[in-house]
Amino acid sequence: MILPCHSISAVHCWHCSFAKNTQSAAAISSLFLNLMLFLSGATFPLDIMPDILQYVGKALPLYYTIQLLRGTWTSGPITDYGLEVGVLLGISVVSLFLASRFFRWSGQ
């Protein structure tokens, strides 16, 4: 559970690095969290969504988190889900790099 939480937090840090203040950061974070919940297959199966939304959903870290959790709960060990773990690690690294690149303490 640590890796999925870290990956999703890193994505939110990157999105919020574009905000000017805490209020806009909260709004951005809420928007992206709700979009991830809808598009990742957490609320509705991806199979019933149009193809373009399926591609968008598969680019989100919550999709791989859900696949990892469903798989380890029902069928096998985490070692069977190397793709999901690798994608979550990659998203974490890239998002933290982008957040550190764009985040500024002041409005400059």
Image (cartoon, grey):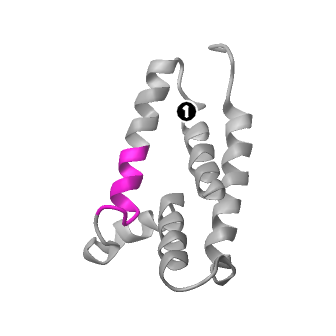
Q: Position of residue 40 (x, y in %)?
A: 41, 63
- Residue at 45%, 23% (x, y): give it: 24
Q: Position of residue 29 (x, y in %)?
A: 46, 36
Q: Position of residue 11 (x, y in %)?
A: 58, 46
Q: Position of residue 70 (x, y in %)?
A: 47, 74
- Residue at 64%, 49% (x, y): give it: 6
* Segment colored magenta: 33-43
- Residue at 73%, 53% (x, y): give it: 93
Please say if 57 is above or below 48: above
Element carrying mark 1:
helix
Tally of marks: 1
Quarter of the C terminus within the rendering: top right
Name the residue nearer the viewer: 53 or 86: 86
Please say if 60 is above or below 48: above
Extreme residue toward the left, this view: 48
Side of 8 where 46 appears, left or right:
left
Q: Quadrant of residue 1?
A: bottom right
Side of 108 where 32 appears, left or right:
left
Prevalent SS, magenta region? helix
Which amino acid, mark 1? Answer: Cys
Please say if 45 is above or below 13: below
Q: Is residue 104 magenta?
A: no
Q: Is residue 41 magenta?
A: yes
Q: Quadrant of residue 17?
A: top right
Residue corresponding to mark 1: 16
Q: Residues within 10 Å of mark 1 (few under 14, many from 20)?
A: many
